[in-house]
Image (tube, rainbow, N blue to C red):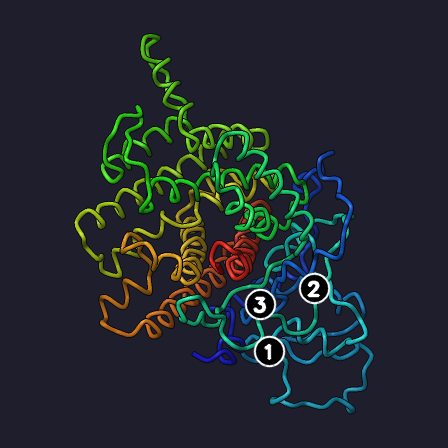
Amino acid sequence: MSVLSRTAASPAGSELAALVAALLADSAAAPADLLPTRSPQAAAPHRDSSHEADSPTPSHLPGPTGLGASGLLEPLLEAGVRVAPAPGGAVSPAEPANADPSTSVQSDSAAPRSATEAISRAAPERRVWVPLGPSGLGTDFTHVRASAPQRQTPSGPTELDSGSPRRTDNGAGIPALYCPPPVRDDPELGAAVNAGLLTWAEGIGLYEGRLDTLRNADFGRLIMLAHPDCDDADRLLAAAKCAVTEWSVDDYYCEEDAADTAPDGSASDAAAELGPKLEMAAAAMDPVHLPVRYQAQLERALQSDPILRAFRTSFEHIGHYATAAQVARLRTEIGGWFIALAAEAGWRAAHRMPPVWEYLTNRQPHSFLPCMAPIDAVGGYELSPAEYCDPRVRRVVTTAALASQMVNDLYSMAREDLSNGREFNLPTVLAAEENCPRREAVQRTADVHDELVRRFESEAAVLAAAGSPELRRFLTGLWAWMGGNRAWHAASKRYQD
């Protein structure tokens, strides 16, 4: 599928989903008790605009113009400009509400390909602003009427959506993806979260001697982009600590230079000790209460490993903002991820390339589910356990997580090519199973990603119509997470170097 056809493709999977999304656009604002409370730590630091150009974020990546697009249309609506949906899910050229219909000019060939393009055509003299809070599906119920300054987004093409595929170091092109753009970009807030991560990591000995690598990965920016309904730096830092802890498991326990030691410090084999080390990580998340005689030995093991210190301290921090049920949800998602890590280790031990269906089954829990689990805790509300565990909700949550993992599979290929066959990604598995060139496998991976995003888009619209305000906001948070994740992967030095 070409870039243009991806852009113009209809975002809704059914007429019902499109109707629901249209109905939601006129809904009432969220109840006050669902809006996040701005804490004292959320006071915005001094803004230095000179740094904004250092962190480019795509303003209109090829992707949906339905779910998530209403926030981009707000400037037009506030200016009295009427925007009507065009065939195929695109946004038609806007015209002033008082325009004379007889003077209108219709041109299919000149129709804009995105909501942002429609804005820039209709009101070129106006600056386009991206809302600081959630936008799109259900956000009239949940939109944060915050007084914090909003970040300006360039109206012209950026490096990431200029029409030509972005290239990785190994020469494999990253195809245009059907994915929402990030809702907001606040480089200084992201930098503040990143600075907090570095201070925390240095204090617990995480990435000792490699802090520059952690700094350049810019996980603070990921969390800022992925949680646009929160401008509290400390809440974002709590989520960022959890995310970095999860990434560090891969960096310390799963890669080719993993230490050949057991949890008690004795010499062993790294591959054999992955399970025992994950078991210790579970004990750091969910405290184990041993008989007194053995508790001190367990404590020494938990204190001796920087990854275990990271799990303990990150859970302590997120516990300041999350309820007990939200913390338990996070533990559960990480536990499922641990099982998937052990399965992947089994493939390595057997020197076996899994079939595509098995690989994708593994990548459902081995995805961004743990990172997405605290979306509501970071946003300052709580999705009930009953709704989170509803099979229909579970389907869209896991769909969003798997789609985001496909983004990671594409952008991490060059990095993983250096792992001597220890790492797996969908292009590699597809190429092995189909005996096809890497380029074709990359395109097939993009198609898988796009199918998942479309599924989420259509099914989330239906769920939002029938669900609680908290569910509508959580679904919007998932949508924003996917957009922020894509933008971060495209720019992070973790994948670009």
* Image disc number at residue 113: 1
Determine contact: label 2, label 1, CB under 8 Å. Answer: no
Q: Could you tell whether 169 is left or right of 436 in the image? A: right
Which of pointers 3 and 2 indicates the residue nearer the eye?
2
How much space separates mark 3 and mark 1, taking CA atoms?
12 Å
Q: For mark 3, does the 10 Å Cα neighbourhood hold few (<14), some (14 to 19), or many (20 or more) residues?
A: many
**Residue type of the residue flagged with mark 3:** Gly
Closer to us: 264 or 103: 264
How much space separates mark 3 and mark 2, taking CA atoms?
19 Å
The residue positioned 43% from the left and 66% from the top of the image is 169
Instruction: Residue under label 3, please give it.
Output: 66
**First in residue order: circle 3 vs circle 2:** 3
Q: Is residue 132 above or below residue 169?
A: above
Instruction: Residue under label 2, please give it.
Output: 153
Q: For mark 2, does the 10 Å Cα neighbourhood hold few (<14), some (14 to 19), or many (20 or more) residues?
A: some
Q: In this view, does 381 lie above or below 368?
A: above
